[in-house]
Image (cartoon, grey):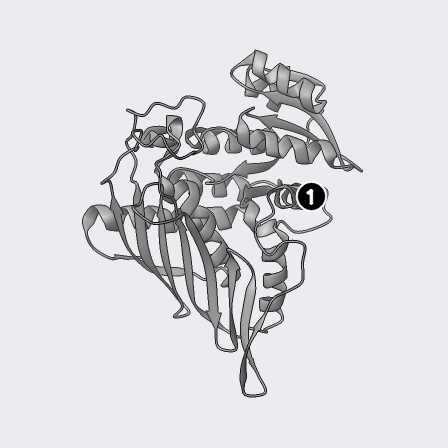
Amino acid sequence: MTNLRVGVIGAGSIAQSHLSAYAKNPDVELIAVADMNLERAQAVADQFGAERAYADPHELLADPEIDGVSICTWNNSHAAWAIAAVEAGKHVLVEKPIARTLAEAEEIQRVVEGSDRVMQVGFVRRHSPNCQVLKSFIDADELGEIYYAKASCLRRVGNPGGWFADKEISGGGPLLDIGIHVLDLCWYLMGSPKVVSVSGNTYDKLGSRGNVTTMPRYKAADYDPDRNSVEDLANAVIRFENGASLLLDCSYSLHATKDSIDVSVYGEKGGAVLEPALQIATEMHDSVVNIEPQIASRSFEFGLGFANEIQNFVDASLGRAESVAPAWHGVEIVRILESIYESANTGREIVLG
């Protein structure tokens, strides 16, 4: 097999990023798009040059011409479609989170382990050049043992509404939507250590903040300012088996003076800030030295991130590379997220075996 024949389930905003990367990839044949709205599926298929459109994803999964599938649906169907795709013999790239709950995630892992199919999780920020450069420094032991990390993503003006604000569909608020990205980046850069305890808090003080109309924000297609059942802030202290720790906070709505993102890791020989812009701190000749790698952008590059993610999925599916984000990574991140919610609900630290 020289090319990967691909189908995409879901035709919303995140699917556009997958489809754009697939359409530009010379190793891909874009076969089909499936969406519960057939008219939208057909329009998107036409836009990106896919051969056909389906209203029922089961029909796409039954298509013998499709080798791999991107799952770009709402969170509440990630697990069901991921499992169905593997059972249909397809390689799978599933958007984050891999599932809403740990039970769903572990069921995906069980199915994947019983197959020879690739299951990759859509942790797209791992594939951005700034992260790849920092990972190369860490893998070369330039920072030494990483023992502390900070993951923060704070927004000020309210959640996107629609399904993002509906816990039954999304599984949670900013923790599962934006917090997962910074959490995953730190965990990945730390070497994916085993979590042993989690202490977390969640707050619902400000709601959807639909009253704020003077600042722009991303809004879901089904935005409703009165619909909200998710937290607006979450924070946590996460401890790992190797003694390292991670401090996390994320919010859709916070009375902060500006939106902010901070992804930082600290080791025995050096430290680094990945976001908002890559910078490395170390010592040379008894002096403290800051290093700024000379790359096109020291921040997350959206288009390149998706292009690299899709290329990694294609290469893994064709047996040319290992997936950078295998299914078990998605399971472990969900384990941490679920433990944060459990700790917040019970008011106690969660100790994991």
| Left or right, residue 214 beside residue 73 | left
Q: Between residue 330 and residue 47, name the one nearer to us.
A: 47
Where residue 158 appears, x then y in whole percent?
34, 36
Where residue 35 appears, x then y in whole percent?
55, 19
**Disc 1 element:** helix
Q: In which quarter of the image is residue 60?
A: top right
| Left or right, residue 341 beside residue 17 | left
Q: Residue furthest bottom?
A: 286
Where residue 108 appears, x then y in whole percent?
48, 39
The quadrant in which the C terminus is found is bottom left
Q: Is residue 304 above or below residue 66?
A: below
The quadrant in which the N terminus is found is top right
| Left or right, residue 310 beside residue 331 | right
Q: Between residue 105 and residue 208, name the one nearer to us.
A: 208
Label 1, on which residue?
311
Q: Between residue 142 and residue 91, name the one nearer to us.
A: 142
Q: Can residue 4 be seen in this view?
A: no
Q: Can residue 42 be seen in this view?
A: yes
Q: Is residue 189 above or below residue 201?
A: below
Q: Residue at x 72, y 46 (%)?
A: 319
Q: Which residue is drawn at 59% across and 87% down?
A: 285
Where residue 352 appears, x then y in whole percent?
32, 57
